[in-house]
């Protein structure tokens, strides 16, 4: 009896499956027949969640693939293949490495713009950034990489900045070579209504540095996605991020915000048309307006008037300053100006742009700075951001500031990041790793030619859990001829060599007379090397191969210090290895009358400069000084025999965004008067005036004032306390 029931049940199940198969197949055939008769392409049934989220606006093919109306994925692929015939390009197949292997190394040539040619302000900034970089060459025979002089940023045929006949013009370049070793910058591609990836010319084998790149068309390891930036984006300097202090808890007044245009028709309208669903007017503010364009009233829908009225109730800057998360939905193209605005404001970007290849995605770990959403799952966004914990919010906001200031705050940084990524690909054996790109101070200030090991840089000791070395190299800058054994440099040598932390002493001989024989120098317990300074002031900051210690003690020949003072300063520096730590302080100030920066040597409680006449710093800054700063600034230092110490302070503060460290010293410390016949800079009556001019010249090149004021001074324990001197380790520092 039981067996009979089993067979009956099995038979019923089989019949059900056959009926389902039959009727399901019949439905598919009927649907195919109907659509075939109408000349349509059969669409898959939309997912239930998609219908709930976007009931009236979403076209599923557009939403999932980002194409134009009625355009299938195969059609888009064929269109792309027609525009970019070398869509499978990689560095190994479409780049000539031989051009980069000569003595010139990585050099970039910019084609001259033709007379009378109109160049947009944004593209002019890009060309200026390349021309002012350390990689620029005016000789195309030295070039590894080429940049077009033709403005290719805006390839929208309806734009006033569209440049026609680009194909014909670039084919006329004798070095074009089907685009090999060329990089093409672009911000806007395609035109109404589909805004495809069409640039209007064949890029061939050129590298695309393009905004709003689609992952479907992105050539990994070859193309570079760049951010969309406005024409007002600064060339240099740029504003700092808005995260002034790390407030705990890190939440702001509004949880989530968006305020921007709503497109009534065309590509990009689906996503923005649905944003009103999450607006509650309390902690989530999502505002759109259709009041833009010439004929918006012709296309206005039932929501326009209400949306426009609500839109005016909130100020965009106030929302940006007071929101924890910022929605960054796609516009007509995948990229949006909101992205950079959110990064600067420390408002965590929540991306709604399916298929967008994020800027510099090859090197930046964006999951540490943004929340990537899905356009089709808009209603899940509020619950997603509410679930982010306070610790995670604070970490995300801090990372937005790091990325903004390292790579996006200026056109200079965007262009240099693009060049550095290409350079790392060309010289992959000497390139930055992911930590160098994603940790302070950022990849642009970490030169892999110095080292590819993290432990060799002062910025990563904390991450690696290590400390700098326990010895230092003293570098003494000598400009006066040796005429007497009682000269200050003789006493200085004895004082420095007595330090148990001193590894060696290097004398940079910058006098016009030849250096004296080794027998003229006093005997010392550490090695002494005399090096020709070639009569250049900046030679003290050359990356001398003889320096093997992490720490460098830079000294002027007439510096007066005690051994204990040196030892204490070294201990202080080991706690702040990325900064300058030393004794003589100086400061800068803004003169509102002259509208210029001023320089003062007055001893006050506030300082922003520690002179390198008696200071410790990491040896990496020698390499950065010689290879990062432009030749024009180093030439100014050599020409005036002045300001090298100020320039080093500018550099270190620009890298760290922190002030130097002032160390306690004896109250009676004074600079010794210059010897007769001395070439010391302060013997020149124009010395102070030159330093004023240097401060303004350096600030102009950096684009802002990197020096940071401080009132922080480090003293030894029990310094000046009324206790027994036998309890004090550095009691000599109090001796008059």
Image (cartoon, rainbow, N blue to C red):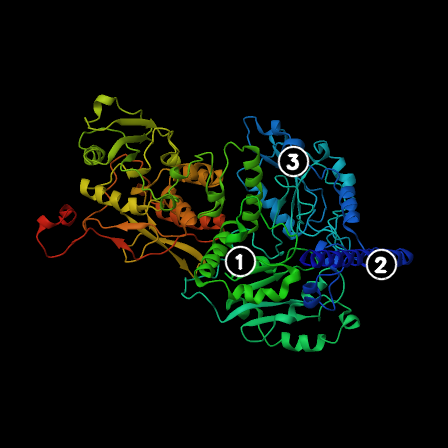
Q: Residue furthest right?
A: 37
Q: Mark 1 = which residue? A: 343
Position of residue 535 relative to residue 275, above or below, is: above
Secondary structure of the residue carrying numbered label 1: helix
Work out whether residue 322 can be spotted: yes
Q: Residues within 10 Å of mark 3 (few under 14, many from 20)?
A: some
Tell me the residue that label 3 is attached to: 90
Asked whether disc 2 touches disc 1, contact meaning CB atoms under 8 Å apart, the reply is no
Residue 417: percent from left, percent from top: 55, 44
Determine the residue positioned at 72% across, 51% down: 189
Callout 3: helix, strand or loop? loop
Q: Residue 202's image quarter?
A: top right
Q: CA distance from mark 3 to mark 1?
A: 31 Å
Q: Mark 2 and mark 3: span between their CA atoms? A: 43 Å
Q: Earlier in the sequence, mark 2 or mark 3?
A: 2
Q: Earlier in the sequence, mark 3 or mark 1?
A: 3
State yes or no: discs 2 and 3 in contact (Cβ < 8 Å).
no
Earlier along the polypeptide chain: callout 2 or callout 1?
2
Q: Secondary structure at mark 2?
A: helix
Q: CA distance from mark 2 to mark 1?
A: 48 Å
User: Front-most of 569 and 218?
Assistant: 218
User: Viewed as shown, does residue 128 lie left or right of 564?
Assistant: right
Q: Nearer the viewer, mark 2 or mark 1?
A: 2
Q: Which residue is mark 2?
A: 31
Find residue 509 and report its image quarter: top left
Residue 639 visible (yes or no) = no
């Amino acid at each position: 009896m039981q067996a009979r029931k089993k067979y009956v049940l099995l038979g019923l199940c089989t019949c059900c499956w056959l009926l389902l198969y039959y009727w399901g197949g019949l439905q598919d055939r009927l649907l195919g027949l109907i659509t075939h008769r109408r000349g349509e392409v059969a669409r898959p049934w939309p997912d239930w969640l998609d219908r709930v989220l976007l009931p009236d606006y979403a076209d599923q093919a557009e939403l999932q693939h980002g194409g134009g109306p009625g355009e299938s994925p195969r059609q888009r692929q064929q269109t792309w293949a027609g525009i970019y015939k070398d869509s499978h390009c990689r560095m190994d197949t479409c780049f000539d490495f031989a051009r980069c292997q000569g003595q010139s190394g990585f050099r970039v040539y910019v084609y001259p713009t033709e007379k009378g040619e109109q160049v947009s302000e944004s593209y002019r900034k890009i060309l200026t950034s390349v021309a002012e970089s350390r990689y620029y060459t005016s000789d195309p025979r030295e070039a590894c990489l080429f940049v077009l002089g033709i403005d290719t940023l805006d390839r929208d045929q309806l734009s006033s900045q569209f440049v026609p006949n680009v194909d014909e013009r670039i084919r006329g370049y004798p070095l074009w070579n089907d685009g090999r070793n060329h990089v093409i910058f672009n911000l806007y591609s395609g035109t109404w209504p589909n805004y495809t990836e069409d640039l209007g010319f064949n890029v061939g084998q050129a590298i695309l540095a393009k905004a709003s790149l689609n992952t479907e068309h992105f050539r990994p390891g070859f193309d570079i996605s760049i951010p969309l930036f406005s024409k007002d984006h600064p060339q240099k300097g740029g504003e700092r991020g808005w995260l002034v202090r790390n407030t705990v808890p890190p939440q702001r007044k509004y949880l989530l915000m968006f305020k921007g245009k709503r497109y009534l028709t065309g590509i990009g309208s689906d996503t923005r048309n649905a944003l009103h669903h999450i607006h509650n007017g309390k902690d989530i503010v999502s505002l759109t307006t259709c009041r833009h364009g010439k004929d918006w009233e012709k296309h206005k829908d039932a929501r326009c008037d209400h949306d426009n009225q609500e839109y005016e109730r909130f100020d965009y800057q106030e929302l940006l300053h007071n929101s924890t998360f910022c929605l960054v939905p796609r516009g007509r193209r995948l990229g949006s100006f909101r992205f950079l605005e959110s990064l600067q404001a420390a408002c965590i970007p929540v991306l709604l742009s399916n298929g967008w290849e994020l800027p510099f995605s090859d090197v930046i770990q964006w999951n540490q700075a943004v929340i990537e959403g899905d356009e089709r799952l808009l209603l899940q966004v509020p619950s997603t951001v509410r679930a982010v914990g306070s610790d995670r919010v604070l970490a995300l906001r801090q990372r937005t500031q790091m990325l903004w200031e390292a790579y996006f705050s200026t056109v200079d940084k965007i262009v240099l990041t693009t060049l550095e990524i290409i350079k790392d690909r060309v010289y992959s054996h000497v390139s930055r790793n992911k930590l160098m790109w994603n940790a302070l101070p950022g990849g642009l200030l970490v030169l892999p030619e110095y080292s590819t090991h993290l432990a060799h840089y002062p910025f990563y000791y904390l991450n690696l859990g290590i400390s700098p070395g326990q010895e230092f190299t003293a570098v003494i800058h000598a400009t006066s001829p040796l005429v007497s054994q009682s000269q200050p440099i003789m006493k200085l040598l004895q004082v420095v060599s007595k330090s148990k932390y001193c590894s060696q002493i290097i004398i940079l001989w910058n006098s016009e007379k030849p250096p004296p024989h080794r027998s003229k120098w006093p005997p010392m317990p550490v090695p002494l090397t005399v090096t020709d300074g070639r009569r250049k002031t900046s030679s003290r900051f050359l990356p001398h191969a003889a320096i093997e210690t992490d720490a460098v003690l830079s000294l002027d020949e007439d510096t007066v210090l005690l051994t204990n003072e040196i030892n204490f300063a070294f201990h202080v520096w080991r706690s702040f290895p990325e900064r300058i730590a030393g004794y003589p302080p100086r400061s800068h100030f803004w003169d509102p009358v002259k509208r210029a920066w001023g320089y003062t040597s007055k001893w006050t409680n506030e300082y922003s400069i520690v002179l390198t006449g008696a200071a410790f710093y990491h040896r990496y800054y020698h390499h950065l000084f010689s290879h990062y700063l432009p030749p024009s600034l180093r030439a100014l230092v050599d020409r005036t025999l002045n300001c090298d110490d100020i320039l080093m302070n500018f550099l270190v503060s620009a890298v760290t965004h922190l002030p130097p460290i002032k160390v306690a010293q004896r109250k009676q410390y004074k600079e010794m008067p210059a010897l007769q016949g001395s070439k010391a800079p302060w013997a020149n009556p124009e010395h102070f005036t030159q330093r004023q001019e240097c401060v303004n010249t350096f600030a102009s090149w950096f684009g802002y004032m990197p020096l940071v004021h401080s009132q922080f001074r480090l003293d030894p324990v029990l310094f000046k306390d009324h206790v027994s001197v036998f309890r004090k380790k550095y009691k000599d520092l109090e001796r008059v």
